[in-house]
Image (cartoon, coloured by chain):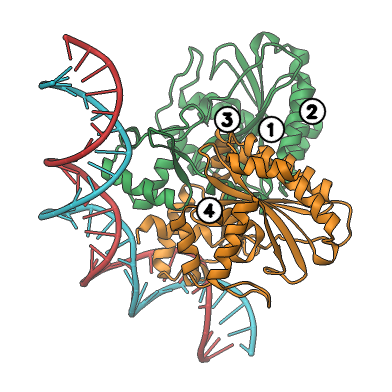
Chain colours: A green, B orange, C cyan, D red
Amino acid sequence: MGTVSKALELLNLFTRARPLIGLSDLARLAGVNKATCYRLMTELAEFGLVEQIGTGREYRLGPAVLRLAVLREAQVPMRDAAMPVLQALAQATGETAHLSILIGGALRTLAHAYATAHATKVTMEDAEVLPFHATSSGMAVLAFQPEAFQAGVLAAPLQRLTEVTETDVAALRARLAQVQASGIAESAGGYESDVSSMAVPLFDARGQCCGGLSVAALSSRMTPAQRDLIRSEITRAGAEITTSWGGTLPPAIATLWRARA
Amino acid sequence: MGTVSKALELLNLFTRARPLIGLSDLARLAGVNKATCYRLMTELAEFGLVEQIGTGREYRLGPAVLRLAVLREAQVPMRDAAMPVLQALAQATGETAHLSILIGGALRTLAHAYATAHATKVTMEDAEVLPFHATSSGMAVLAFQPEAFQAGVLAAPLQRLTEVTETDVAALRARLAQVQASGIAESAGGYESDVSSMAVPLFDARGQCCGGLSVAALSSRMTPAQRDLIRSEITRAGAEITTSWGGTLPPAIATLWRARA
DNA sequence: CCCTGTTGGTTTATTATATGAACCGATGGT
DNA sequence: ACCATCGGTTCATATAATAAACCAACAGGG
């Protein structure tokens, strides 16, 4: 593996749940020598991608990531464009809306929005990397990836997160076909017990599926009427985000969604 | 130089004015071999920090920077916290407000806000790296850096951007002392002709000056009354941003600003 | 107070890794 | 048909990354 990849792997260790990491921890987590880790972090820090803070000299992400993000958003405003739609979706459905995008072959959380309606809401703060096979967003996105990508995902070990998580490859392939045919993915309790969700794929300017939009609710609240509402709202929001990204909805999907809504 | 630094240097080549760069250009700009550049970019792309787009296979910043920024803002909300204050400052003064932060030893633009009042406004879109000696923000920040840092900046060649850009080291040191004594920096035409500006330093939780806040106006509009208004508003906004960053205003500055306002 | 196990940081010889010149096929202009 | 460019690839060479060992400093525990 290249040195650069090792350094970037270090960056990936920072999560919402673990925002501050000391040198030794970092080396252990990444499985690299402490001296190596030190040198890599020094280089990252020089560039401002990480910074050392406080007495423990722990590291955290630095200000440079902000600048890069501002630059990226100025050119390709994905987050800024999607946020209002995401919030409107949460409000309209009264549930938690969730936006994720493909980064380096993994589906990662970009933002979420909560409705003010319910006291009990599905929180997804900690879900940073979404398993494709166990989430509606994951299935929605995976269904519209190239066959090679799907094969790679399905070839890897599929973790069983709850008692009802589907891990059978054949069954998952059948579900993917279903998602392709309906333009929408549904999931019940596969990621977390008692949580049901629906998701749609999002497309970029190249026409490639690069993210997913989902609405998650407590399974007890997922009545037929609520499902109809969510389906109608999420397809509308999905189309809106895709077009706001300069993306083009595949014609097949556009007709599917129009028929439902 | 380490390999990682070379890769990160490549990232730094992307600017608002030059958001898309081809492989050969990239190699030329960075002064590295094309093969090396290719390998580095491939590694960066694998991580999602850059992506290839369109027919020319040009590169641009990738979605991973977004994710990192979201993570950083969740822990240290610098931009989110400062934006409303920045906009209010622009509105209150009727001029262009500008926020910059220290990244890797350079002062870089993070955000700006325009007032709706005037038809002619000072645009600073393209200023990505602010020269310390020629801008009010630069002087405001530099004045509150460690002596070693100041010496390093003043030892480097100081570019003459306009006819009135101060490049004499002794004179600049005198100005820095003046900034330290007043808690505010002023500049007239040193960066761009006919543009005057005032700036204040911003401090982080460690009490270190890590950024600057400025208001820029056409010199013709910078009347004594307007200067008083800007001075009053910018110190208030500066204090607000600093505290919203969890920072502590140095007591000396706090009293200076209170006396003026 | 010593003992032990941390921590962040530094040094060293060893070797794995990055490098750059040359080459390739494709593309676009003249 | 030509020439210059493009993105991408190859491979011998040499540079730059590595890992173990070692610091000094700190924090409990007995």
Q: What's the distance in space between the residues labelled 4 and 1, CA to CA?
A: 29 Å
Residue beneath disc 3? A139
Q: Earlier in the sequence, mark 2 or mark 3?
A: 3
Q: What's the distance in space between the residues labelled 3 and 1, CA to CA?
A: 11 Å
Q: Earlier in the sequence, mark 1 or mark 2?
A: 1
Residue B52 in sight: no
Q: Which of B107 and A198 lies nearest the eye of the viewer?
A: B107
Snapshot quadrant of residue B74: top right
Q: Are marks 2 and 3 on the same chain?
A: yes
- x and y, in percent, of residue B259 in the image: 72, 43
| Mark closer to the observer (3, 1) | 3
Q: Is residue B235 left or right of residue A109?
A: right
Q: Earlier in the sequence, mark 3 or mark 1?
A: 3
Q: Are marks 1 and 2 on the same chain?
A: yes
| Mark closer to the observer (4, 3) | 4
Q: Amino acid at mark 2?
A: Arg
Host chain of mark 4: B
Q: Amino acid at mark 1?
A: Gly
Image quarter where the N terminus of chain B lies is bottom left
Under tag 1, what secondary structure? loop
Residue beneath disc 1? A183
Under tag 3, what secondary structure? helix
Host chain of mark 3: A
Residue beneath disc 2? A260
Under tag 4, what secondary structure? strand
Residue at 63% x, 66% y is B134
Q: Is the residue D18 above or below the residue A140 in the image?
A: below
Q: Are marks 4 and 2 in contact (CB under 8 Å)?
A: no
Q: Are marks 1 and 2 in contact (CB under 8 Å)?
A: yes
